[in-house]
Image: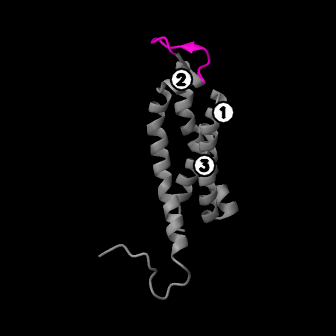
Amino acid sequence: MGLSLKKPEGVPGKSWPAIIIGLFVAFGGVLFGYDTGTISGIIAMPYWMNLFSTGYVNPQGQHDVSPSQSAAVVSILSAGTFFGALTAAPFGDFMGRRLALIASTCVFIFGVIMQVAATGLQLFLAGRFFAGFGVGLVSALGTSQPL
């Protein structure tokens, strides 16, 4: 038995929209795991430490963010995920689940763009929050009733 992308006979509509929406939904878990797993390596990079340093010098003598700022960078993604999951139901009711899933990935992309464009810690933190918000939306919208 192989993977079939054809819809069953007698079912109205096309199958490709359902496949694309399924990929959006499946990607929600990947986004959260990837963002959570890579941040520790990113904040340990000398370039990142120098760029986002707020004047703190770590025990190795390098410019860095303070331990509390580092904790904020790591944890704010989860805060965004929390608020994204809380607002997923009204967001889905307002837009419909399919459009809300697509829009939530756009929110995640917006957060990533903010992080990439950041040259200061505040914008980086805002980007992490919006990326988490998008992940929370995707996660909650994708685990409710069928499309």
Q: Amino acid at mark 3?
A: Ile
Amino acid type of disc 2? Met
The N terminus lies in which quarter of the figure?
bottom left
Position above or below: 113 against 52: below
Secondary structure of the residue carrying numbered label 1: helix
Secondary structure beneath disc 3?
A: helix
Q: CA distance from mark 1 to mark 2?
A: 15 Å
Contact between labelled residues 2 and 3, with CB atoms less than 8 Å apart: no
Foreground disc of the pair 3, 2: 2
Q: Which residue is mark 3?
A: 109
Q: Residue furthest front?
A: 47
Quarter that holds the C terminus: bottom right
Question: Residue 39: x percent and y percent?
Answer: 48, 34
Magenta extent: 52-62
Mark 3 or mark 1, which has the lower sequence index?
3
Residue hosting label 2: 49
Q: Secondary structure at mark 2?
A: helix
